[in-house]
Image (cartoon, rainbow, N blue to C red):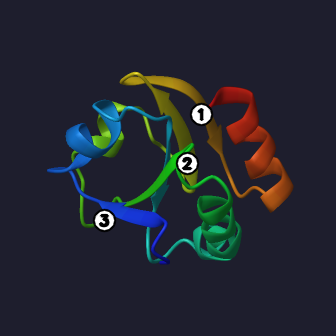
């Protein structure tokens, strides 16, 4: 992960995501998920591009089993944009950098 992407946990989710002053893109992922790993370069590039405008965080659901079920995460990767503490939109499955950028622009 680069300096613009924050790893979050069940314990830090509320503070990092729900209480954030800026929109937050949450990437729910797992070590065993190939498409999750394939999206990492795009996620990192967009985190740098949107720095200061949108916070991008990653949550490993294997290490943090409590948050994902609360938000109905059933497959990986799942991406959610939160604004003002609520889910604005959700995308499931691997996305290209252009698709990710459009998802952020439409919802952030």
Q: Foreground residue, 15 or 89?
A: 15
Quadrant the C terminus occupies = top right
Q: Foreground residue, 56 or 58?
A: 56
Q: Earlier in the sequence, mark 3 or mark 1?
A: 3
Q: In the figure, residue 71 lies in which quadrant?
A: top left
Q: CA distance from mark 3 to mark 1?
A: 20 Å
Q: Residue at x 56, y 46 (%)?
A: 79
Q: Residue furthest right?
A: 98
Left/right of residue 71 with respect to residue 107 in the rendered view: left
Q: Foreground residue, 38 or 4?
A: 4
Q: Residue furthest left?
A: 11
Residue 101: x and y in percent read: 76, 48
Left/right of residue 50 with respect to residue 87 in the rendered view: right
Q: CA distance from mark 2 to mark 3?
A: 14 Å
Which mark is on residue 90? 1
Look at mark 3 in the image and give the residue it sits on. 62
Instruction: Note whether 70 is above or below 12 in the view shown.
Output: above
Mark 2 is surrounded, within 10 Å at the Cα level, by few (under 14), some (14 to 19) or many (20 or more) other residues, namely many
Left/right of residue 50 with respect to residue 23 in the rendered view: right
Residue 70: x and y in percent read: 30, 32
The secondary structure type at the circle numbered 3 is loop
- Residues at marks 2 and 1 touching, judged by CB atoms closer than 8 Å: yes
Q: Residue at x 76, y 55 (%)?
A: 95
Q: Earlier in the sequence, mark 2 or mark 1?
A: 2
Q: Residue at x 34, y 35 (%)?
A: 20
Mark 1 is surrounded, within 10 Å at the Cα level, by few (under 14), some (14 to 19) or many (20 or more) other residues, namely some
The secondary structure type at the circle numbered 1 is strand
Q: How many marks?
A: 3
- Residues at marks 2 and 3 touching, judged by CB atoms closer than 8 Å: no
Look at mark 2 in the image and give the residue it sits on. 78
């Amino acid at each position: 992960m680069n300096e613009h992407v924050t790893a979050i946990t069940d314990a830090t989710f509320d503070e990092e995501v729900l209480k954030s002053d800026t929109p937050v893109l949450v990437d729910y992922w797992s070590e065993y998920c190939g498409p999750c790993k394939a999206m990492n370069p795009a996620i990192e590039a967009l985190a740098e591009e949107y720095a200061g405008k949108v916070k991008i965080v990653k949550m490993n659901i294997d290490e943090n089993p409590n948050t994902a079920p609360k938000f109905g995460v059933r497959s990986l990767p799942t991406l959610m944009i939160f604004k003002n503490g609520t889910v604005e939109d959700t995308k499931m499955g691997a996305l290209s950098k252009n698709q990710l950028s459009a998802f952020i622009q439409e919802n952030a």
